[in-house]
Amino acid sequence: MAGGQATNSGIDYQQRVAAWCLINQYVEFNISTFFDQLDEELIISKILFETAQPIDDLNLQCQNNKTVFLQIKRSLSLSIRESSDFYKTIYQFTQEFIKNEKTENLFGLITTSDASSKITHDLKKIVVSIKLNENAFEDNPLNESEKDTLEKLEKIFESIYKKVKKLKATKEKFIEFVKRIFVAIIDIQAGHPNETSSLMLLKSIGFNSPEIIWSILIKNSLTYASNRQSVDSKKLSKIFDKYKKNEKEGTSKESIDDLLKTELISQGDFPVGKEVLLIESFMKELDYLIVELYRFRDDCQIKNKFSGNKINISDEIEWTIVQRFATMTGLERYMDENQKIFINKKIVVIPANEIETVEDDKCSELHKAYLADLMESNKEILSCLHCGKFVNDLDTLTVEIEDQDTSPTVGIVHKNCLRPIDRILGKIKIPGREKGYFLDTFDYKLWVALVVKGQGMLNALKASPNMLDGHSPLIGWNSDEEYDSDYSYCIKFNLEDGSTSYSYQRSKIERLNKLQAEEHLKLFRGFKINNSNFDTMLTLFIVI
């Protein structure tokens, strides 16, 4: 009876891993961090279940044309006996390695934290260290347990290689083999961290009842495996879309991606034909001007150039922009949200003549199609266009980026990342985000990527008496605490010719925490260039 239960739990675990892979395939999530492949991107394009390959549990075909072969074991110990699961796993890895030695395909052992520490710690450390440095253990000696693990792995490989290849394996061949292996600890049993993160991902992409969808995916994975089927991204999208349509609960049947595409459009069209600018006044008697401009020339080229916080009207005329908009409605909303700035200020509106029908002309139609293509090419539609981090604010800004400093694109940005020359198209409201919502800055995808590296607390909770009693523990945090992540600042230089630059280190913008950034500013401000005060040239710039 015990053997049957173990087999059933192993099958359940394998299908849960498969369901986890399906979710990551659908959202095009980069799973490389889970697999310790930090120098490349692994986005699943196709999943093959129970294949005829030597490593037959699950094969992931990725967008970079690399295949990841997975052997999935809920629990495992390191044993050199030929009847052991570990020996059989290395045998399968070696067979595939010999079969396709010239490829860069990867061989993954997927297991849980219940596996032996020789697997979850020693073997995982060994394969990662050899990837980073072939001579790692000469500089950083292994402890006795790690040495034993490495010796057993090498002994098994040499034995299998000789049996299959009929040749003796060299040391170099063993190193090449180990570089292709990874060990991933994915605790995805009921109530465990990776199941929780999977449910959160399902919720974030528009499913009101993620638990139901999760159970369906697990069940379907068993069917796919039994029939040795494969699922590509196109087919998977149809499956997910069908589930969304069939959901009866919740206020919206649209995914967040679809909602964004809908809310970006005003009455079926992108507003593209005019510029609505709030600028610093060039007339002494006024504080600000609101200016409406035609956007296109007769040949449909964009008239004006934007850079930094400026618009270049001509060789002689340049205005300083406070904020750029697509519509007057957007400007009015902005001013209403920032009333304190504009109290007792003198502001005049300068409208453009006969601009009401500009959205219907041929230039606007061409640009709308262009923006639609840009939007389709944005693969990270829930990430900020500037900092690349997840956007989950209550009121999310959608913008068109079109200027001299940045590649053109359409998407969403954090309010703190918004630049004056970002052309605000409007706002979206994500379903379920209401006043008092405490996860408005929570990055679901980043949490999913990091949870595998921070399971100490979660594993301790799993083993706590409350969990054994069937109760779910609670984790609390102070949501009012100011968020000040390390390396969230950089230093910006405002140059004499009107351009800007940043502090670089090894060809990349230098990212600092707030304290480091302030210290760097003090250091720079101690210099003078051509008797000019360097102080005025420096800006502490938040890059969050």
Image (cartoon, grey):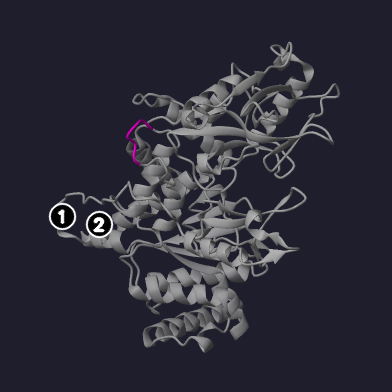
Say which of 446 and 159 sits in front: 446
Q: Nearer the viewer, mark 2 or mark 1?
A: 1
Q: Is 531 covered by the magenta stretch?
A: no
Q: Amino acid at mark 2?
A: Gln
Give SS at disc 2.
helix
Residue farthest toward the front in the current orientation of the protein: 285
For mark 2, what is the residue? Answer: 5
Residue 214 position (above or below residue 538): above
- Which residue occupies the foreground of this view, 465 or 374? 374
CA gap between label 2 and label 1 equals 25 Å
Crowd rating for badge 2 (residues with CA inside 10 Å; few <14, some 14–19, many 20+) = few
Q: Position of residue 382 (x, y in %)?
A: 52, 40
- The quadrant of the image that shows the N terminus is bottom left
Foreground of the two, 171 or 208: 208
Secondary structure of the residue carrying numbered label 1: helix
Q: Residue at x 44, y 72 (%)?
A: 124
Q: Which residues are magenta?
A: 433-438
* Mark 1: amino acid: Asn
Question: Is 220 on the left or on the right of 293, as rendered?
Answer: left
Q: Position of residue 374 (x, y in %)?
A: 68, 35
Residue at (37, 43) in percent of width and height: 199
Closer to us: 356 or 309: 309
State the predominant SS element of the stretch in magenta: loop
Q: Residues within 10 Å of mark 1 (few under 14, many from 20)?
A: few
The image shows residue 70, relative to residue 232, as above or below, that is below
Is 437 covered by the magenta stretch? yes
Q: In this picture, is 485 found above or below 197? A: below
Which image quadrant for residue 88? bottom left
Read off the residue under disc 1.
466
On the image, the x and y values in percent for residue 347 come to 60, 23
